[in-house]
Image (cartoon, helix red, strand yellow):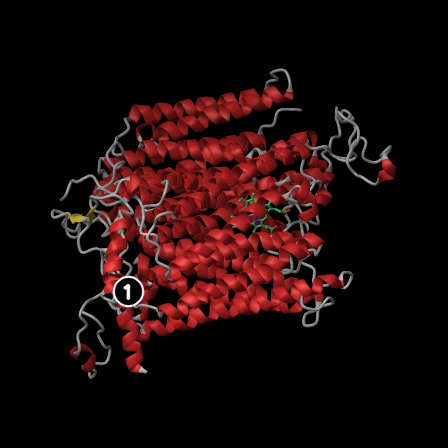
């Protein structure tokens, strides 16, 4: 029934970056890209469910969400958005350098990305700290200083801050994971590992992930920080 | 080559070299199993662990059944009863059904069927098993620690506010197990797209591959939603983030929406791979190309898509808008169409086939009947009006057991028998297995058919007292009797399959005379599946029932049925041993 | 090394497309401009709250499209990647169908539910058809505010 292909030598030894289950680099690269996109689809659904919850509650309690959101610091949000958009650019550049096999460029760009990510987390830290200080973290002590609620009904404001901490927290977790992965990638580049230098795909995959993190923030920012007055 | 003894004095082993290396005997060390990237070994790891969880889930099931034989219960406290049925549901759904066919049979077969050396991402595949085990251990930990009593559905606010704190641990376990299923899904999708052998076009794929692909799609679209929904409960319990809390103005019904947005598709994660197994069994044992190959292939995708549009039929009485209820009722009827197409096509395949009534085929025929009943009663429930009467009764319990046990578990057993020679290189004893298949069918119907009746009469699900209606008792007793038979019929294969590992006759590469790439390599296959990547030149299910029938007749005249020759030999050798 | 195509859809080979610097840089600057527009739009009243929200989400979506299309390289990616992107967001919208429930659901107290039920309240189904319009002041949930 099935004939045997005669010319298929096993990939070993031909290409250091080629895994045994693949026939050639093209197949391997395609597989990784498709795999990453499939994973990103799951991430879209993952955050999507949270956005759905947010949409529902915000439509139910428009005024309270608006009043509660005034407690957020728009400047900090803006800065963070700038930082993330810029880091998306540097990651895209690092992919470009990886394609051109320019090790120095890749390392520089990934380094800047790391700095951006760190800056993002530091700003987040100060934001969170402020909210905690103002007793805006949901739970028993919530709203014990009503002046920070800006007149929102405490219960509904609590819903808002529950979503705020839940969604930005999960997003922040993704940023941290991104930092770890980028750090790992940088180490690989630093050590001239053929896994990354011979093949730009690992860099590309990390880039895709990082852009997704950016994408989530693009929606989080206007939804959390910039509500129009109802 | 084969076993390399750690002790240099032991030379006897290397003195008797094995004739061939395969994935099982390539390396015997435990490390080589726990760090393997080989999809076949991962399938075996899954088989062992999933069987263990199935065993635990079955014990819980037995407890439930025995408790229900008396109208006021007699072995369990109310609290305990709640924990037992929750444990049963959680283990069976998240640790058995969702993983059983995809992660065991699917993992084992997908690369073999498409002519690949391995899955696209072997390490991800291994990670998936570790995630599964981590999730399983957490879930079991929660149960040992005192158990949860929220049912497998974890409805808020009960699970987020009132239930005991083991819920957090169990939910974390389910969350992690969910990622195991996501990684498996990603692997299936990428492997099907990118790893097919030359000549293996989409319409030469065995229907099992189509089914696994559709399963992968459902997994990646649905699982993240339930993951984040359950995460919200964890957030609520651990971090006080009020996501669904009604007392603050949150909406508990939203939890149900999100939960069923995954969990209805999840029933298709359980049944789609079973459909795939079923198509393979029917084609091989009717010795005929499956009738309407394209229809079956596309109906898998249609189910994957439509399955996402009917979640609301679980919420008809949960204050869901009645307008949306009407729409969901309608779409629920639509989703039955692709399932029905499959049933009709399998039945049509039997027509003029050269049917061989071997064990897998008996399971497959049982599947058709049981799944039909399960699916049709699904329509009773999907019908807005009747559901108000039937919801939360034993009618539902019977409905989903007909599809999940009568469908998925039956297909799993059928598939396990069918591919057992390929997986282990050994033949199982055919005659016991045949009788056991019949026993499964009888035991199953005895267990669950009475539940339809008693449910229709009004027996509520998740109750263990029915002293207000002692007339239910005969049905419960019948059901418990049946479950005993069923339990027996699950233990027997466990015994003879295990025994066949050492005592069974060696299987040839293709003991069934079946058609497909997985049968072209040796049994068990070598680690890299094929010595060389095959090139596919012919169509799938290329059987010729008429000539085969004639050949069978000729062989019968010589008193040795050709396709049975292996088996006959094994039976003889067994007799000799005795 | 063998160059046989392994599967029907593996022959597109567009992944290794190197993006020019001006495109990436331009895209980033454009996104920054959009970000400022986002902020500006949030302070501007386009008429009513629905339009304001739609505008905000529209701008965010445009930003997302540029990130996906250029930074993530979908512009040059395989057809499969494009299908995946569309399918991902398509199913996300499908999930937003959940909101259809809330749009058509009648919050308690539902008119006709608590009073004037024919046959002595034996049925909880509202008997008036068409159902009465939702009152302005329904429970805690819809508290109109200044
Ligand atoms: C033929 C298409 C099917 C239809 C129309 C259908 C319909 C329904 C409906 C309407 C319910 C909800 C009843 C209620 O809560 O009042 C239900 C419950 C259920 N169905 Fe199906 N079903 C179908 C197929 C399946 C399949 C194939 C499976 C599994 C493999 C399945 C598993 C379940 C389960 C587990 C439940 C109970 C969930 C719970 O715990 O509440 N169904 N089905
Ligand atoms: Cu359902």
Visible in this render: residue A80? no
In the image, is residue B548 above or below residue B572? above
Q: Could you say where residue B363 lies in the image, as x and y percent from the top left?
A: 43, 58
In the image, is residue B246 above or below residue A225? below
Considering depth in this image, is B309 or B3 the residue closer to the camera?
Answer: B309
Question: Which residue is drawn at the image coordinates 31% and 66% (left, top)?
Answer: B424
Q: Could you say where residue B115 lies in the image, as x and y percent from the top left?
A: 25, 49
Question: Which residue is drawn at the image coordinates 48% and 42% (left, top)?
Answer: B340
Chain of the residue where label 1 is placed in the rendered structure: B
> Badge 1 is on which residue?
B564
Query: Which quarter of the figure is the N terminus of chain B placed in?
Result: bottom left
Question: Which residue is drawn at the image coordinates 55% and 55% (left, top)?
Answer: B401
Considering depth in this image, is C38 or B269 the residue closer to the camera?
Answer: B269
Question: Is B163 placed left or right of B528 in the picture?
Answer: right
Question: Is C136 placed left or right of B115 in the picture?
Answer: right
Question: Which residue is drawn at the image coordinates 29% and 26% (left, top)?
Answer: C21
Question: Is B254 placed left or right of B471 in the picture?
Answer: left
Considering depth in this image, is B76 or C44 the residue closer to the camera?
Answer: B76
Q: Quadrant of residue B131?
A: bottom left
Element type at mark 1: helix
| Mark 1: few/some/many CA within 10 Å (<14, 14-19, 20+) | some
In the rendered image, the residue lying farthest to the top is: C47
In the image, is residue A217 above or below residue A169? above
């Amino acid at each position: 029934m099935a004939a045997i292909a005669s010319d298929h030598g096993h990939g070993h030894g031909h290409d250091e970056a080629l895994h045994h289950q693949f026939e050639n680099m093209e197949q391997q690269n395609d597989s990784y890209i498709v795999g990453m996109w499939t994973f990103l689809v799951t991430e879209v659904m993952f955050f999507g469910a949270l956005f759905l919850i947010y949409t529902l509650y915000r439509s139910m309690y428009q005024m309270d969400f608006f009043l509660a959101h005034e407690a957020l610091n728009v400047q900090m949000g803006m800065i963070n958005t700038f930082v993330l958009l810029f880091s998306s650019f540097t990651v895209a550049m690092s992919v470009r350098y990886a394609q051109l096999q320019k090790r120095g460029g890749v390392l520089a760009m990934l380094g800047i990305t790391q700095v951006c990510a760190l800056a993002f987390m530091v700003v987040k830290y100060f934001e969170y700290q402020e909210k905690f200080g103002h007793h805006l973290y949901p739970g028993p002590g919530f709203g014990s200083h009503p002046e920070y609620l800006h007149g929102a009904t405490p219960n509904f404001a609590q819903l808002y801050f529950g979503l705020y901490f839940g969604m930005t927290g999960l997003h922040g977790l993704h940023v941290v994971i991104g930092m770890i992965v980028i750090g790992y990638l940088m180490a690989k580049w630093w050590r001239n590992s053929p896994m990354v230098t011979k093949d730009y795909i690992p860099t590309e995959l990390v880039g895709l992930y990082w852009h997704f993190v950016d994408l989530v923030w693009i929606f989080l920012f206007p939804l959390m920080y910039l509500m129009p007055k109802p | 080559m084969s076993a390399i003894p750690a002790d240099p004095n032991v030379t006897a082993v290397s003195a008797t070299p094995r004739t061939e290396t395969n994935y099982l005997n390539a390396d015997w060390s435990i490390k080589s199993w726990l760090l393997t990237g080989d999809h076949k070994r991962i399938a075996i790891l899954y088989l062992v662990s999933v069987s263990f969880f199935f065993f635990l889930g079955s014990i819980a099931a037995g407890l439930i059944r025995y408790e229900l034989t008396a109208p006021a219960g007699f072995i369990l406290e109310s609290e305990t009863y709640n924990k037992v049925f929750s444990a049963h549901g959680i283990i069976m759904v998240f640790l058995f059904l969702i993983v059983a066919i995809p992660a065991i049979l699917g993992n084992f077969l997908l690369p073999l069927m498409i002519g690949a050396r391995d899955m696209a991402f072997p390490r991800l595949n291994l990670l998936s098993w570790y995630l599964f085990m981590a999730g399983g251990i957490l879930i079991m930990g929660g149960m040992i620690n005192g158990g949860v009593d929220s049912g497998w559905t974890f409805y808020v606010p009960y699970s987020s506010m009132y239930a005991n704190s083991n819920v957090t641990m169990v939910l974390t376990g389910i969350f992690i197990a969910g990622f195991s299923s996501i990684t498996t899904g990603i692997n299936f999708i990428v492997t099907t797209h990118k790893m097919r052998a030359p000549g293996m076009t989409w319409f030469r794929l065995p229907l099992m591959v189509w089914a696994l692909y559709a399963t992968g799609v459902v997994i990646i679209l649905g699982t993240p939603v339930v993951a984040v929904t359950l995460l919200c409960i964890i957030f609520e319990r651990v971090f006080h983030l009020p996501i669904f809390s009604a007392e603050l103005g949150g909406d508990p019904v939203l939890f149900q929406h999100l939960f069923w947005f995954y969990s209805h598709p999840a029933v298709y994660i359980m049944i789609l791979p079973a459909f795939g197994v079923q198509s393979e069994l029917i084609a091989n044992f009717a010795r005929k190309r499956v009738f309407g190959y394209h229809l079956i292939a596309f109906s898998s995708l249609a189910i994957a898509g439509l399955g996402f549009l009917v979640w609301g039929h679980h919420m008809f009485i949960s204050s869901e808008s009645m307008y949306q209820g009407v729409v969901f009722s309608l779409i629920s009827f639509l989703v039955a169409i692709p399932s029905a197409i499959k049933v009709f096509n399998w039945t049509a395949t039997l027509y003029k086939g050269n049917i061989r009534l071997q064990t897998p085929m008996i399971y497959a025929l049982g599947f058709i009947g049981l799944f039909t009943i399960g699916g049709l009663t699904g329509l009773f429930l999907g019908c807005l009006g009747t559901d108000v009467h039937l919801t939360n009764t034993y009618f539902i319990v019977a409905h989903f057991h007909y599809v999940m046990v009568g469908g998925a578990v039956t297909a799993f057993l059928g598939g396990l028998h069918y591919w057992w020679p390929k997986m282990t290189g050994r033949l199982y004893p055919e005659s016991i297995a045949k009788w056991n298949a019949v026993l499964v069918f009888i035991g199953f119907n005895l267990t669950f058919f009475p539940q339809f009746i008693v449910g229709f009469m009004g027996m509520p699900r998740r109750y263990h007292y029915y002293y207000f209606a002692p007339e239910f008792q005969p049905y419960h007793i019948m059901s418990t009797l049946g479950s005993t038979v069923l339990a027996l019929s699950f233990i027997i294969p466990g015994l003879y399959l295990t025994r066949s590992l050492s005592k069974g006759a060696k299987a040839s590469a293709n003991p069934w005379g079946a058609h497909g790439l997985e049968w072209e390599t040796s049994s068990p296959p070598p680690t890299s599946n094929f010595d060389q990547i095959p090139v596919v030149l012919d169509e799938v299910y290329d059987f010729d029932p008429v000539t085969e029938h004639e050949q069978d007749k000729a062989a019968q005249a010589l008193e040795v049925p050709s396709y049975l020759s292996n088996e006959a030999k094994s039976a003889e050798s067994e007799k000799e041993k005795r | 090394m063998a160059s046989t195509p392994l599967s029907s859809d593996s022959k597109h080979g567009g992944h290794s497309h190197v993006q020019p610097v001006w495109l990436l840089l331009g895209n980033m600057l454009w996104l920054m401009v959009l970000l400022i527009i986002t902020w500006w739009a949030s302070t501007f009243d386009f008429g009513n709250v629905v339009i304001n929200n739609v505008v905000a989400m529209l701008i965010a979506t445009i930003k997302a499209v540029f990130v996906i299309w250029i930074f993530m390289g979908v512009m040059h990616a395989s057809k499969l990647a494009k299908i995946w992107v569309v399918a991902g967001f398509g199913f996300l919208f499908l999930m937003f169908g959940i909101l259809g429930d809330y749009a058509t659901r009648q919050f308690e107290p539902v008119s006709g539910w608590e009073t004037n039920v024919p046959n002595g309240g034996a049925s909880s189904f509202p008997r008036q058809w068409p159902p009465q319009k939702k009152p302005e002041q329904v429970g805690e949930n819809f508290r109109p505010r200044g």
